[in-house]
Image (cartoon, rainbow, N blue to C red):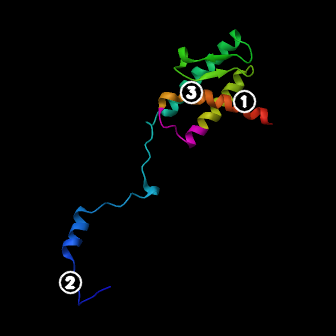
Amino acid sequence: MLRPYEDTPLEQVEKAVISGKLPRAPVSNKHEENLETNYIYELDKKCSLVNDFIIVKQQEFNEGDTISAAEMTGSTKLLTLHKIYSPIELKNMKKEFINLSKLHPPKEKDNFADQYIAFIDSNYEQEDDY
C-alpha cells in the first residue's frame, strides 16, 4: 500500500535485499543425493553373494542357528536360519528386494548386504503371519 505522506525506508529495504536471510528451498524441489547409476549392479552382486553364502551355510548349520556373513559379504548383521531356503526362494527374494530398492534407493552402498539380510529375516516373519 502506498503512503505518499511517509518516507520510504530505503536503508532498511537495501539491507533486507542485499544482506537479508534467504528463504528456505522448497521441499518439492530438493535434490536428493542418489548413488551412482550402477548401484543396481552392485546391489545385485551383493545379493548374489549373500544367496550363495546362505546356500553353502545351510549344509553346515541347522534350522534356528545364527550365522555371520561377515567373511564373505562384509555384512555386520547376523542371519538366523529360520528354515532351509531353496535357491528359487532366494532368487525370488533377491528380485523382490532389488525391485523394492529401485523404488526406494538406499542411501549408501556400504550396507547392501546388511539390508538384504534384514529383508530376508523380515520376509520370514511375514510368512509366519499368514
Amino acid on which the number 3 mark rests in the picture? Asp
Nearest the eye: 44 or 129: 129
Residue lying at 74% horizontally and 19% vertically, measured from the top left: 84
> How many residues crowd around disc 2 within 10 Å: few (fewer than 14), some, or many (20 or more)?
few
> How many residues crowd around disc 1 within 10 Å: few (fewer than 14), some, or many (20 or more)?
some
Amino acid on which the number 1 mark rests in the picture? Tyr
Q: Considering only order in the chain, which callout, 3 or 1, is on the residue closer to the N terminus?
A: 3
In the picture shown, does residue 33 fall above or below 125? below
x%, y% of residue 109? 48, 31
Residue that numbered label 3 is attached to: 114
Camera-side mark, 2 or 1: 2
Mark 1 secondary-structure assignment: helix
Q: CA distance from mark 2 to mark 1?
A: 73 Å
Residue that numbered label 2 is attached to: 7
> How many residues crowd around disc 3 within 10 Å: few (fewer than 14), some, or many (20 or more)?
many
Please give left or right for residue 2 compared with residue 121 in the image: left
Q: What label sits on residue 124 in the rendered view? A: 1
Which quadrant does the N terminus fall into? bottom left
Q: What label sits on residue 84 in the rendered view? A: none
Residue lying at 43% horizontally and 56% vertically, measured from the top left: 29
Q: For the residues labelled 1 and 3, say whether their Cβ atoms are less than 8 Å apart.
A: no
Amino acid on which the number 2 mark rests in the picture? Asp
Mark 2 secondary-structure assignment: loop
